[in-house]
Amino acid sequence: MIPLSLYVHFPWCLRKCPYCDFNSHAVRGEIPENDYLAALIRDLDRVAGDAQGRPLSSVFVGGGTPSLLSPAAVDRLLSAVRERLPLADDVEVTLEANPGASEGGRFAAFRQAGVTRLSIGVQSFDDRLLAAIGRIHTAADALRAVEQAQHAFDRVNLDLMYALPGQTLADLDRDLDQALALGVGHISAYHLTIEPNTAFASAPPVVPDDDLAADMQEHVEARLAADGFGHYETSAFARDGQRCRHNLNYWTFGDYLGIGAGAHAKISRAGTVSREARCKHPEKYLRHDDPVDDRHIVSADELAGEFMMNALRLIDGFPLALFEEQTGLELDCIADALRTACDDGLVAIDESRVVPTLLGQRHLNALISRFL
């Protein structure tokens, strides 16, 4: 059976970052925690049948800034999940947190509620760079949050960003020095991109040029590899046993339920794959009995492209058999595109596996576009 995960979206932040194009909204007044939790549980009741008896391999509470939730709310949410859905014995439960938007004392309570993994949006340990990207926390806040998280959790992820406004290679090196000194098991490292409909799109900052940004990417990969991190996805690096199971389920085209404002879902049923998207605005989500804005069956042509869009992000590639298992399609439908990608040096193919080459990794969008 196709593996299954659950994504829960929490749509509020203390302040909207100028680069962020996620479904997040700055808090105005008090967060309607109880009302939102009740809406999530109603939503969970709607989707529980889509599990089709499958246990959840992972739960991911993302945002926004979910660490703004009280531990009691997280406990109630996860209790509701356990009451309605079977969980794998080793289920991974991730909660996202931001320094400056969570108190360390909460982390132990989150663990007690059932969270097993904390993902912290550090971005940088340089106060100048944090200010340049509009973060509300300081480097000291970030250090304190990570150290407190490590007291409560065995599995901690740091989000870092590079190619920031005014950042040099030496600045990046200092960020990596600090991240590695903390001894976490997982690091997600993202290139800053200027997305449409963000504050940075309206007033773009001066960022490193393409050559320097490429040098930074290579530097991140080399430093983390030298310290024992395996590069397993475009932006993800992990020590042994620390890979993010939830995100791996996305990249291997598993199924996932999605609840919360703006959440998406992918569900396989009787040989078809359907997608759902919930309304983005929290007030609309709270107000509607059925918050789903869009439901559709994914066509065969779209299905092949969607699989490749995810699986080609994996540094070790994917087994050819996985394509047929997860999509129900024959390999013939991507054979020509695979062959030309191989001829152009973007992927390597043996009898059982497709692996993006270094050239394919560096030109991932161009590689993926061949299958869309």
Image (tube, grey):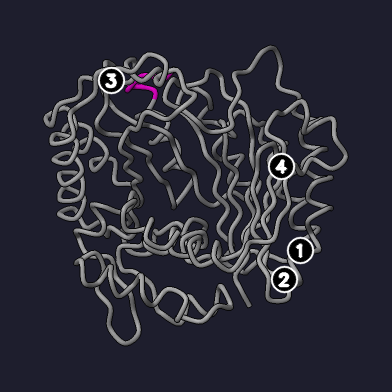
Label of residue 268 in the image: none
Q: Give residue 50's mark.
A: 1
- Residue labelled with disc 2: 269
Of the two numbered discs 3 and 2 on the same chain, state the one appearing first in sequence.
Answer: 3
Q: Give the labeled residue for mark 4.
A: 278
Mark 4 and mark 1 lie on one chain; the one further toward the N terminus is 1
For the residues carrying marks 3 and 1, which lies nearer the camera in this image? Answer: 1
Q: Work out whether 116 lies above or below 1.
A: above
| Mark 3: amino acid | Leu
Q: Give the residue at x 27% y 26%.
A: 164
Tag 2: residue type?
Arg
For the residue carrying disc 4, how many other residues have a C-alpha within 10 Å: few (<14), some (14-19), or many (20+)?
A: many
Between label 2 and label 1, give the one nearer the viewer.
Answer: 2
**Mark 2 burial class by Cα count in 10 Å: few <14, some 14-19, many 20+:** few
For residue 129, the mark is 3
Percent across and percent down for residue 357 are: 22, 65
CB under 8 Å between discs 3 and 4: no
Callout in the foreground (3, 4): 4
Residue bounds of the magenta highlight: 135-141
Using residue 108 as the reference point, say whether residue 75 is left or right of it.
right
Residue at the location (25% across, 21% down)? 165
Distance between the Cα atoms at labels 3 and 1? 44 Å
